[in-house]
Image: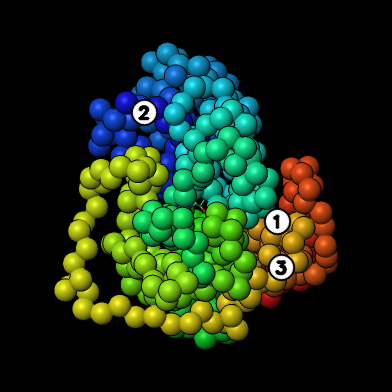
């Protein structure tokens, strides 16, 4: 029996992780869980999984907690993430909150010597060097949940210490893969939220449409697998069957395949190195017939170019990209700016802020705040 704390249990990743706990009750028990706003779903989850601690990062008065749920310790506000990540004993901590909110939690969990299962890519995008140092210090490698990074991690299991010379990071290409640049710029919220292969949270779905998700994943891969951006190639593969691949010095390429189903990488992280049933459908290559590949188009999706530029610039450039993108996506989802405004705001923030340091968490949170401030300033300029 292993205990798991889940930060962001009401999200797309969080709910699937809980479904896996329910599928293997003899194997996993929930120690702590947190949610942000979705209290109705969270109350149901607490009722079902009976953790030792539950917390809402958006605080509510204790009187609003149903009487039958007061059996556990309740923590409200930001403290909830810290308590779930570091105070409540657990064999593993799944960080599946969205956004830069995940960085402090990952650092807290590592400082408390916890095994971290990492869905929140923003922690590595913004604080990759600090997170990797902290993980090395405790000798517990991060277990990636993001499907591409899980795929690469799985491909490296049989590598006997041989380092890859190149990573092939696959991308579905999102809903606008075949659209031209002008049409993409004026895409609606509904069109951008309509991902062809994956059902995910709203933020990452918009990022898939702009390919900022792939930009964040290049940064995530840079830290997890310690390769420079030139050795990380984006391969657009619309069927999302090959989840990524690694190339070795002898020319051999090893890939991981499967139907697009996040339960597989989530559970691989939960039961690593063991494999357990997930409820996922088996892969039927005959039904698929063919798999296709294209180059990522950095002209249509400038995010792909910005990833390498920010990684090479170093300092807080990736944090600025991430913070500006988070703020811009929120503005797009709120109907305040057109889709094309997202990239323009990110480029505007990078240009306006220039080089900023990222020596510690304070620097990183400062750069993040600055990026959001500049996006708010520039918002009117991209409204049409
Ligand atoms: P969702 O938006 O579905 O869920 C986010 C979770 O975080 C919810 O539990 C939400 O609570 C909580 N949350 C939201 N804002 C805050 C905040 N400010 N502080 C603390 N908690 C907060 O996101 P996903 O599950 O899609 O994604 C989670 C992370 O995993 C992201 O970093 C994403 O990039 C990554 N990821 C997701 C994949 C997917 O398939 N969904 C695939 C690969 C990576 P509430 O709902 O109660 O408001
Ligand atoms: Mg991914």
Q: How is the image coloured?
A: rainbow
The tag earlier along the polypeptide, 1 or 2, is: 2
Residue 312 — which label?
3
Q: Could you tell me how far apart the alpha carbons at marks 1 and 2 are, in whole angstroms?
A: 34 Å
- Residue 2 circle label: 2
Residue 296, percent from left and from top: 51, 79
Find residue 75 and report its horizontal and vertical position in percent.
57, 22
**Of marks 1 and 2, the one in the foreground:** 2
Q: Is residue 65 left or right of residue 375?
A: left
Give me the residue at 44% from left, 19% from top: 52
Q: Quadrant of the N terminus?
A: top left
Secondary element at image label 1: helix
Question: Which marked residue is nearer to the observer: mark 3 or mark 1?
Answer: 3
> Callout 2: few (<14), some (14-19), or many (20+) C-alpha neighbours within 10 Å?
some
Comes first in the chain, label 2 or label 3: 2
Q: Which residue is mark 1?
A: 319
Label 3 secondary element: helix
Q: Residues within 10 Å of mark 3 (few under 14, many from 20)?
A: some
Corner quadrant of residue 160: bottom left
Taking the spot 51% from the left edge, 58% from the top edge, the residue there is: 204
Q: Residues within 10 Å of mark 1 (few under 14, many from 20)?
A: many
Residue farthest left in this picture:
286
- Inspect this view and state whether residue 142 appears: yes
């Amino acid at each position: 029996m292993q205990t798991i704390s889940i930060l962001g249990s009401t999200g797309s990743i969080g709910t699937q992780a809980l479904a896996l706990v329910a599928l293997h009750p003899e194997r996993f028990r929930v120690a702590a869980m947190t949610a942000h706003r979705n209290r109705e779903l969270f109350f149901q989850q607490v009722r079902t999984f009976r953790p030792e601690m539950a917390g809402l990062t958006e605080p509510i008065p204790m009187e609003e907690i149903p009487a039958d749920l007061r059996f556990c310790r309740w923590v409200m506000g930001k403290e909830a993430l810290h308590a779930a990540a570091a105070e409540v004993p657990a064999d593993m901590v799944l960080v599946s909150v969205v956004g830069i909110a995940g960085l402090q939690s990952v650092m807290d969990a590592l400082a408390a010597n916890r095994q971290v299962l990492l869905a929140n890519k923003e922690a590595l995008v913004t604080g990759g060097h600090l997170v990797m140092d902290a993980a090395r210090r405790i000798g517990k490698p991060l277990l990636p949940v993001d499907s591409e990074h899980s795929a690469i991690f799985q491909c490296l299991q049989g590598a006997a210490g041989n380092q890859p010379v190149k990573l092939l990071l696959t991308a579905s290409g999102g809903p606008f893969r075949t659209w031209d640049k002008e049409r993409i710029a004026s895409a609606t919220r509904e069109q951008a939220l309509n991902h062809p292969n994956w059902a995910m949270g709203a933020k990452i779905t918009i990022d898939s449409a702009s390919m900022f998700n792939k930009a964040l994943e290049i940064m995530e891969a840079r830290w997890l697998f310690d390769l420079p951006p030139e050795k990380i190639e984006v391969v657009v593969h619309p069927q999302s069957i090959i989840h990524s691949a690694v190339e070795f010095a002898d020319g051999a390429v090893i890939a991981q395949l499967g139907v697009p189903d996040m339960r597989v990488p989530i559970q691989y992280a939960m039961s690593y190195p063991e494999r357990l049933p997930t409820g996922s459908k088996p892969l039927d290559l005959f039904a698929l017939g063919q798999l296709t590949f294209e180059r990522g188009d950095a002209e249509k999706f400038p995010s792909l170019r910005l990833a390498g530029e920010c990684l090479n610039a170093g300092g807080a450039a990736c944090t600025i990209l991430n913070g500006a993108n988070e703020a811009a996506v929120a503005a797009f989802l709120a109907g305040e700016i057109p889709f094309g405004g997202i990239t323009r705001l990110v480029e505007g923030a990078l240009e306006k802020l220039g080089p900023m340091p990222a020596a510690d968490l304070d620097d990183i949170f400062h750069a993040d705040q600055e990026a959001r401030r500049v996006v708010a300033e520039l918002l009117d300029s991209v409204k049409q």
